[in-house]
Amino acid sequence: DISSATVSMTIIGEVALDFPVMLDDVVLSRPGRTEFHVLTFKETLKADETLLVTDESTFSVPGRIDVAQPTLQTIYSLQPEVYPDRANFRPRIDDIAVAAFTLRFGAAVAAGDVLVVTA
């Protein structure tokens, strides 16, 4: 179980990095706010240490979102008595349709939180 990462690079105070620091293949922790412990060294001597970086300096780990019971129904399948010949057809290009699905969230969703769904 690896719970830390070491990044070695030259950093000059108040000078922006030429490229961002990116870590691949990271497994995120439980949903919620993240916390970091940061140490900087000059050669082999510890130059600075921040024991806890939180709040605006970090990010939130998203919870899992499961999509259950997805359906896509055309206006024809929603009104089979009006469109008996087309009611059983699958949606086609340019058909008006209604997408319905149930979302289950792995983290608490507070009142006022926003979920953006795009197509």
Image (cartoon, rainbow, N blue to C red):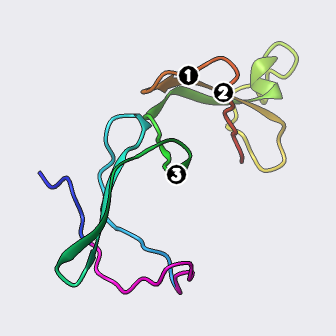
- Does 117 appear above or below 87? below
Lower position in the chain sequence, tag 3 or tag 2: 3
Rendered residue at 19%/76% (across/down) = 45
Q: Above or below — where is 13 with respect to 75?
A: below
* 50 is within the stretch colored magenta: no
The segment highlighted magenta reads 7-18
Amino acid of disc 3: Ser
As drawn, the label of residue 113 is 2
Q: What residue is drawn where x is 82% and y is 41%?
A: 95
Q: Give the foreground label among 3 and 2.
A: 3
Residue 116 location (% of width, % of height): 70, 39
Check the image and name the residue furthest to the right. 82
Look at the numbered discs 3 and 2 and tell me whether their residues touch, using CB distance below 8 Å.
no
**Marks 3/2: CA–CA distance:** 20 Å
Mark 1: which amino acid? Val
Graded by Cα atoms within 10 Å as few (under 14), some (14 to 19) or many (20 or more), the crowding at tag 1 reads few
Question: Going 34% across and 84% down the picture, which residue do you hit?
Answer: 9
Answer with the quarter of the image where residue 49 lies: bottom left
- Kindly report the distance in space between the C-alpha atoms of the residues bearing marks 3 and 1: 22 Å
Q: Is residue 64 left or right of residue 80?
A: left
- Asked whether, in this view, residue 16 is left or right of residue 27, the answer is right
Q: Position of residue 73 (x, y in %)?
A: 71, 29
* Residue pointed to by mark 3: 57
User: Label 3 crowding class (10 Å Cα cut-off): few <14, some 14-19, many 20+?
Assistant: few
Q: Residue furthest top?
A: 81
Q: Which residue is mark 1?
A: 109
Q: Quadrant of residue 25?
A: bottom left
Query: What amino acid type is highlighted by mark number 2?
Result: Asp
Q: In the depicted view, which residue is nearer to us: 60 or 37? A: 37
Q: Nearer the viewer, mark 3 or mark 1?
A: 3
